[in-house]
Image (spheres, rainbow, N blue to C red):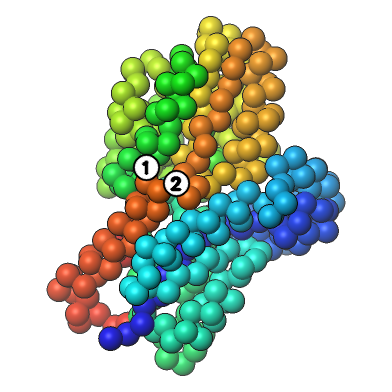
Amino acid sequence: MPRKGLLLVNLGTPDAPETGAVRRYLREFLSDPRVVDIHPVGRWLLLNLIILPFRSPKSAHAYRTVWRPEGSPLMVYSRALTAAVAERLAGEYDVELAMRYGNPSLPDAVARLKARGVTDFTVMPLYPQEAPSSSGSSLARTYEVLSEPWDVPNVRAVPAFHDHPAFLGAFVEVARPVITGMRADHVLFSFHGVPERHVRKSDPSGKHCLASGGCCDVLTDANRHCYRAQCFATARGLAQGLGLSAGGWSVSFQSRLGRTPWIQPYTDVVLPELAARGVKRLAVMCPAFVADCLETLEEVALRGREQFLASGGEELTLVPSLNAHPAWVDGVVRLVREAEARVTSSPAAAAAPAAPSPVG
């Protein structure tokens, strides 16, 4: 029997909350053409003349507000999840954590698995919703690394899990006691944003995405790969699981960069609007992230809370992410086993070559 390995892949984090480390991280991250999808010359000018000189010091300061003695929150929680999943899958899979950008790098994680004799790989991008700039880039880089040797190993991918019961159920279990305990009068689902052009590129018809106010109300063939539509599907599933009323929740998108249009509504616009509507106790969930990080702990729990209170709100509470919660460990194990079962039970799989290709 081939020895199986599991790669848990997240986006990444600087090695330290210092300007130099943040600059190195941003350079690798924003040099990716799937992230900043403009002409290479324009991307180089934007990165080296504007973003790196001005954003690196600001981002380093932001990281320092949430950094822990053990490292960045994203790294701390990702390592804890990896350890818990490895314990659960002991004897089935060798498990490694990899970051798309920064450390531990994908090549290093793959090398560690190969050194233990792994020849059969499962890759799980830790992004609930599918986006070319996150899951797409992570899978493309993983396939590239695994395809470098002459003999390409067998590899499968865990698909996006934005509406999977294992993901939704775990987040409901984490969120319910927080929302109930604070007596929230509204829940805001704040997702990471992407440029509008990214969404339009994922529309095969070129006519559906962002063409109407209700384009994301239902998942169809036209928007099946649309990040925004998957975010709304996640929000609907969580609202149902939490028993929220129709007017008791809303959706927004955070972390936009630059002047080009990003998907809306924007979180920093919605927060004062909710306060003006009379929302006093606001719970914020960030279901695009499975681990708390700069975007949740600094952008929402610190800056977002300050903005909401200044606008007349009384309390903003960030619902913790899934991190290494036991329900999420169970969820990861279920998703991994289902991905393998889907391949091994498929008649086409038996005749397919052992080449990198996503599942689903």
Label 2, secondary structure: give it.
loop
User: Please, is residue 84 above or below residue 113 in the view?
Assistant: above
Q: Earlier in the sequence, mark 1 or mark 2?
A: 1
Q: Position of residue 67 (x, y in %)?
A: 72, 47
Residue at 55% x, 40% y is: 193
Identity of the amino acid at label 1? Ala
Residue closest to the eye, 30 or 195: 30
**Res. 335 mark:** none
Report which residue position mark 1 lands on: 170
Residue at 34% x, 27% y is: 242
**Res. 325 mark:** 2
Residue at 42% x, 36% y is: 174
Q: Residue furthest bottom?
A: 150
Gap in Å between the C-alphas at discs 1 and 2? 8 Å
Residue closest to the eye, 81 or 47: 81
Q: Position of residue 261 (x, y in %)?
A: 59, 37
Q: Position of residue 9 (x, y in %)?
A: 50, 62
* Res 317 quadrant in image: top right
